């Protein structure tokens, strides 16, 4: 069938995002939970919900295989290092915006808050950059 490159890219991007979400759904259906300091996932899916989600995920992925075959869409491989680098870049921007200069958009921050935040945010930025640097290193 005839398909323009623009259509192919648009279709691929939408289906890629769907497939990526399905991977996360599958992990939850398989029991994933995550607990950290400010973020916690509680897997409140029942056994029946998990089985149903796995079944639906497999069905959707079957349809995605048809799209892939018929529209000649290639799988994009994403390495963990690249994903970490991308995420740390986004996080870096958000962390910078915790600075008092940016917080003024929500009202003048107190000096006490500024004294507390500034060194902590600088440390977080340094450590997030370090994670990015580690992920950027060539495999030995």
Image (cartoon, rainbow, N blue to C red):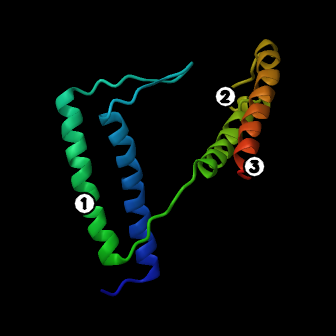
Q: Secondary structure at mark 3?
A: loop
Which circle marks residue 100 in the picture? none
Q: Residue at x 25, y 62 (%)?
A: 63
Q: Are marks 2 and 3 in contact (CB under 8 Å)?
A: no
Q: Quadrant of residue 54?
A: top left
Q: Nearer the viewer, mark 2 or mark 3?
A: 3
* Residue 84 in picture, x, y percent from top left: 62, 44
* Residue 109 in picture, x, y percent from top left: 75, 20
Q: Residue at x 71, y 38 (%)?
A: 131
Q: Quadrant of residue 112?
A: top right
Which circle marks residue 62 in the picture? 1
Q: Work out which residue is located at the far bottom of the displayed protein and give it.
A: 2
Residue 29 falls left or right of residue 39: left
Q: Earlier in the sequence, mark 2 or mark 1?
A: 1
Q: Secondary structure at mark 2?
A: loop
Q: CA distance from mark 2 to mark 3?
A: 38 Å
In the rendered image, the quadrant that contains the N terminus is bottom left
Q: Residue at x 34, y 87 (%)?
A: 2
Residue 110 falls left or right of residue 83: right
Number of labelled discs?
Answer: 3
Which circle marks residue 106 in the picture? 2
Q: Nearer the viewer, mark 2 or mark 1?
A: 1
Q: Quadrant of residue 134?
A: top right
Residue 17 vs residue 64, the one in the foreground: 64
Q: CA distance from mark 1 to mark 3?
A: 37 Å
From this view, report whether residue 41 is shown above or below residue 83. above
Estimate how packed mark 1 is, as few (under 14), some (14 to 19) or many (20 or more) residues with alpha carbons within 10 Å.
Answer: few
Question: In this figure, which residue is indicated by the disc labeled 3?
Answer: 137
């Amino acid at each position: 069938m005839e398909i323009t490159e623009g259509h192919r890219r648009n279709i691929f991007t939408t289906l890629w995002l769907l497939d990526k979400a399905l991977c996360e759904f599958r992990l939850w259906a398989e029991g994933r939970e995550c607990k950290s300091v400010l973020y916690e996932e509680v897997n409140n899916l029942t056994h029946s919900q998990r089985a149903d989600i796995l079944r639906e995920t497999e069905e959707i992925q079957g349809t995605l295989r048809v799209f892939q075959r018929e529209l000649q869409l290639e799988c994009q491989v994403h390495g963990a290092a690249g994903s970490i680098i991308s995420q740390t870049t986004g996080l870096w921007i958000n962390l910078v915006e915790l600075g008092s200069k940016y917080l003024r958009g929500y009202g003048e921050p107190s000096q006490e808050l500024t004294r507390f935040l500034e060194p902590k945010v600088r440390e977080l930025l340094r450590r997030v950059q370090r994670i990015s640097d580690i992920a950027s290193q060539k495999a030995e």
